[in-house]
Amino acid sequence: MNETSLYRLIQQFVDFLSIEKGYSANTCRAYAHDLGDFLQYFSQNRALPITGDTAPDVDATDVEAAGAMILRSYLGSLHKQGLKKTSIARKISSIRSFFNFLERYGVIRQNPAGKVLTPKQEKPVPAYLTVDDVFRLLDAVDTGTLIGKRNRAILETLYSTGIRVSELVGLNREHVDFSTKSLRVLGKGNKERIVPIGKKALSAIEAYQAELAAKKKIAKKSHSALFLNKNMGRLTTRSVARVVDKAAITAGLSVPVSPHDLRHSFATHMLDAGLDLRVVQELLGHSQLSTTQKYTHVSMDRLMAAYDQAHPRK
């Protein structure tokens, strides 16, 4: 790799993540944004010339020569901006991964971010709904219209499978197998997995597809997006978030609800019912068991409360 312009190397790195690693477009954009912020900071604080708004004239060896000091300075600036520890940790991780990439391909001799410590992470308990609240949410949708049937099918599918909202909007009709009661889902890193789906969700999908065929004359077997917007295009994640939020308001729930909260609720309810942690890991599409283990804190809180209430010698 002969290129040494940091701006162009970032572009090459993002292409590498997309093509070689199979990272999603959203993840690649996050890396590009984090590295672009650092590039701008470095240029401004090292008094280096800027050739344009988006292309500071910084060489990879400039950063290597500055060493960890400039990275610690950048870390301090992030703290001063009041960013959350999770956001700071992500930015440092992006920079570390990028310079690992440059070191691997011989652009620099040593990763200047190698000795920069990542802020210690807090481990918040995931937000989730009770079973009763989930049922209230699902029942709040008026299924008397095409959009209502679609929205009910969306909510039922999210809770029944625990899939990510990005995975939901990526579903096509052929990904639903009614005979085996399963979905074929394309997850992070373009990893495909099969997840079971319940009868209620399948019935809601079938009702929506039947109404769609009747009202819009769209054949049920066509290989198109499973959930469509009013213009008959594929739904976006933002549209699904609005559907969930509106249902939560209609149901009179006291807290805002996101699609990810339904995923958290799915995982928590499965563990509360006694499902093995590794099975839940597989269902959620987590590559690391530690990611799934955060849900055990929720279940453990409930377990301890039940213990305190029941045991004669508290």
Image: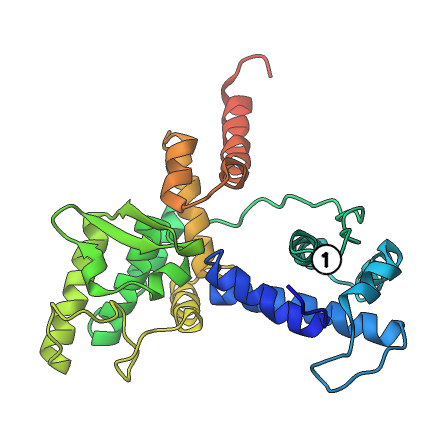
Which quadrant of the figure contains the N terminus?
bottom right
In depth, the one of 153 and 313 nearer the eye is 153
Q: Where's residue 249, x and y in %?
A: 43, 67
Residue drawn at x 90%, y 77% as measured from the top left: 47
Left or right: residue 101 versus residue 20 is right
**Figure check: 207 above or below 112:** below
Q: Which residue is mark 1?
A: 88
Compared to residue 48, the image places residue 177 above or below, namely above
In depth, the one of 173 and 159 nearer the eye is 173
| Residue 244 drawn at (x, y percent) | 40, 65
**Quick one: which residue is furthest to the front in this view?**
2
Is residue 305 visible in this depiction of the protein? Answer: yes
Q: Amino acid at mark 1?
A: Ile
Instruction: Point out residue 107 in the picture as x, y percentages from the top left corner.
Output: 71, 60
Q: Residue at x 34, y 73 (%)?
A: 235
Q: Farthest residue in the bottom direction?
A: 52
Residue 90 falls in which quadrant of the image?
A: bottom right
Determine whether, in the image, residue 8 is placed left or right of residue 162: right
Q: Residue at x 25, y 48 (%)?
A: 197
Question: Could you tell me how many numbered marks the image carries?
Answer: 1
Which quadrant: the C terminus? top right
Which residue is at the front of the view, 281 or 140? 281
Does residue 30 show up? no
| Mark 1 nearby-residue class (10 Å; few <14, some 14–19, many ≥20) | many
Image position of 123 (left or right of 171)? right
Q: How far across and down, in percent of the image, does residue 179 sit?
A: 11, 48
Quadrant in the picture for residue 29: bottom right
- For residue 225, which quarter of the picture? bottom left
